[in-house]
Image (tube, rainbow, N blue to C red):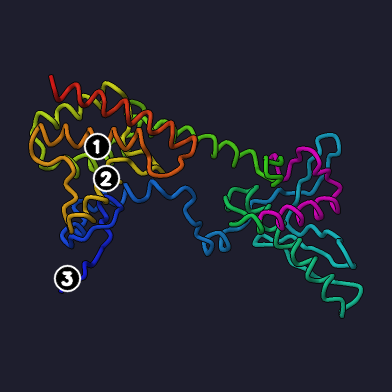
Amino acid sequence: MMQAISYYINPNTRGLTSNYKNTVIKDKEAYNGVMSQHLLNPVEDLVQVLNTPIKLVKSASLSSQNNSVNIAEGQRIRVNGGHVLTVTAYGVDVSGGDNPYDTESYVKAQSMADALTSLLQNAGGTMTTVAHSKEEYAKYTEEITDVMSYLGVDTSKDFIVNGMKYSKNKDGWYESEANNEAQAAYEQLKANNRTYQFADEKTKKQIAYISDYYLQTVPESVKAAWQETLEETGINPFQTDLTSTLTQLSVEQDFLTGGNDNIFGETRESCLAAIDKILERIENPLATITEERAAYLQQEKEFYTVLTSKIRE
């Protein structure tokens, strides 16, 4: 009777393995760095956000010329159904109401209060993410549009709240100037870290760690060729949010052999044979690829082509 094979997560490569020994984290510090690089937007500490006073201006004002509004603590905003939104240092309260039995009107006012609270926290720098789904962003945008109209602010164009400029993004959601700048900085960092020569030290450490995992049994001459290829091509073969062809083949081999994910082997010839497999897979991917992945595959192709020539020198 054939014994069933159990599969585990290999935390060092983020793939599946049937060899239990591969589940050992060989370098916890590097492992944590490798895994954290895939978290685009870490979840904010909402308890800290809620317990941090909102940075409000000292006095309320409105400028139609600049399409800006300053919202201060204690400011009262009359909205639908006679409800009043009162701004506090920790949020926006709802009171009043012409009809105590009109729950729909109250729910609407409370939704505007919640959205305004998030906007003020965002404008003051204590909250980065005002919503966590398309539905939440759509609802947030609707409520901010309404509450701004009660304040006399035109949201059809850029507007300013407590000194922070807001505009609509391509999805029609309000984004602050600070968020736009942070996103642009992140995209630039990600672009830099997809190279070797412009990567930060943390990313270079991650590249070295993953490289060492795959190269642990190869001859020293191959390790030297690998490092020379990194420096000469400037390519990061293990880029953020993209699975390397090397990792794919390693996982496949692990399944086929029941635990051996060592792609490169121990000799110069076995390394060259493995690179041939990688290049063949790059030319013939198993599934439809995105434009981003196509660009990555071209970089991989350049990297392994240069690596091959250096190993053969």
Relative to 161, is 76 above or below? below
The three-letter code of the residue at mark 2 reads: Leu
Q: Which residue is mark 1?
A: 277
Which disc is residue 2 wearing?
3
The residue depicted at 72 percent of the width and 49 percent of the height is 58
Observer-nearest of 127 and 313: 313
SS for callout 3? loop
Say whether marks 1 and 3 touch (CB < 8 Å): no
The three-letter code of the residue at mark 1 reads: Lys
The residue depicted at 16 percent of the width and 31 percent of the height is 272
Q: Position of residue 108 (x, y in %)?
A: 80, 66
Q: What is the number of callouts on the image?
A: 3
Viewer-nearest of discs 1 and 3: 3
Residue lying farthest to the front in this orientation: 1
SS for callout 1? helix
Task: State the extent of the magenta-drawn residues as a range.
Answer: 137-166
